[in-house]
Image: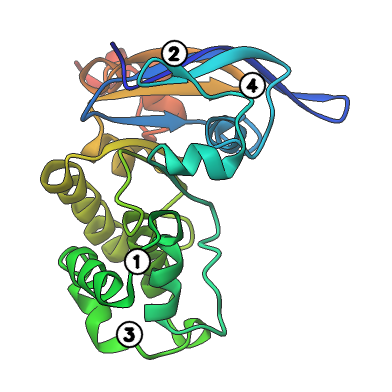
Amino acid sequence: MPKLEVEHIQAFYGRAQALRDVSLTVDEGEVVSLLGANGAGKTTTLKVISGLVRPAAGTVKFDGERIDGKSPEAIAALGIAHVPEGRHIFPGLTVRENLYLGATVRHLRRSQLNDEVDRVLEFFPALREHLDRRGWALSGGQQQMVAVARGLMAKPRLLLLDEPSLGLAPIIVKQLFRTIGEINQKERVTILLVEQNAPAAFSVSRRSYVLETGRVVLGDTVERLVRNEMVRRAYLGLGGAESSGA
């Protein structure tokens, strides 16, 4: 049974339809990516899964249990952590305080919280020297590290990552995605990743879906998608098989 099953989801913002019959699955331990241009419906898909947007039709199941219709708090308590686009760290709080907030659903004591901070900083050692700095004083790359580390504080079974590479320098993106791969392997966290940066997404994903105007237009293994002419042209900046000499 897949860890996550999204079936025939339709979603609206007012009268504007954002998702049109979206279906996808994520198996236990997988990293699956969602590709698409701005407005394709990627972020809305994550919001439906985490309960921030109520679907007009369709179902979402986690470990076989239907979760569409549950509150975001109830969904988080099941082990689904959502790291939103734009980081959304609290600028007036320290890095440590931002991390504490990620464990709210676990109701831990202060000593346990500090143990968990130590655990997640194994993946982001560069943050150790910044634990007592305010969020506003961090670089964009450091803020993104805090956002992902805060998601890990919930000890999630499913981690939803929305555009983690957005606005980051290429060298930081490479480091961040290496860490995302390590989190998947070492913490055994299932990950659904929204990205416009296809090469970065493909570096950690086993499978990927492509969304266009609220619809899934492709879904396959990364190995096959990198040979797909539409993907090569639209997302990898390459010509088709013929023009590449393949």
Residue 51 is left or right of residue 120, and the answer is right
Quarter of the figure with residue 127: bottom left
Is the residue under label 1 in contact with that under label 4 (CB below 8 Å)?
no
Read off the residue under disc 4.
214
Quarter of the figure with residue 222: top left
Q: Which residue is located at x 21 percent, y 55 percent? A: 179
Residue 48 is left or right of residue 208, and the answer is right
Please give the label number shown on residue 218: 2
How packed is label 1: few (under 14 Cα within 10 Å), some, or many (20 or more)?
Answer: many
Please give the label number shown on residue 145: 1
Residue 96: x percent and y percent? 37, 79
Q: Tell me the kind of residue under disc 4.
A: Gly
Instruction: Please tell me which residue lies in front, 124 or 239.
Output: 124
Give the spatial CA distance, label 4 vs label 1: 29 Å
Is the residue under label 2 in contact with that under label 4 (CB below 8 Å)?
no
Please give the label number shown on residue 74: none
Instruction: Please tell me which residue lies in front, 245 or 6.
Output: 6
Give the spatial CA distance, label 3 vs label 4: 40 Å
Residue 123: x percent and y percent? 18, 63
Residue 238: x percent and y percent? 35, 30
Q: Tell me the kind of residue under disc 1.
A: Met
Please give the label number shown on residue 131: 3
First of labels 1, 2 by sequence position: 1
Mark 4 residue element: loop
First of labels 3, 4 by sequence position: 3
Give the spatial CA distance, label 1 vs label 2: 30 Å
Instruction: Please tell me which residue lies in front, 167 or 9.
Output: 9
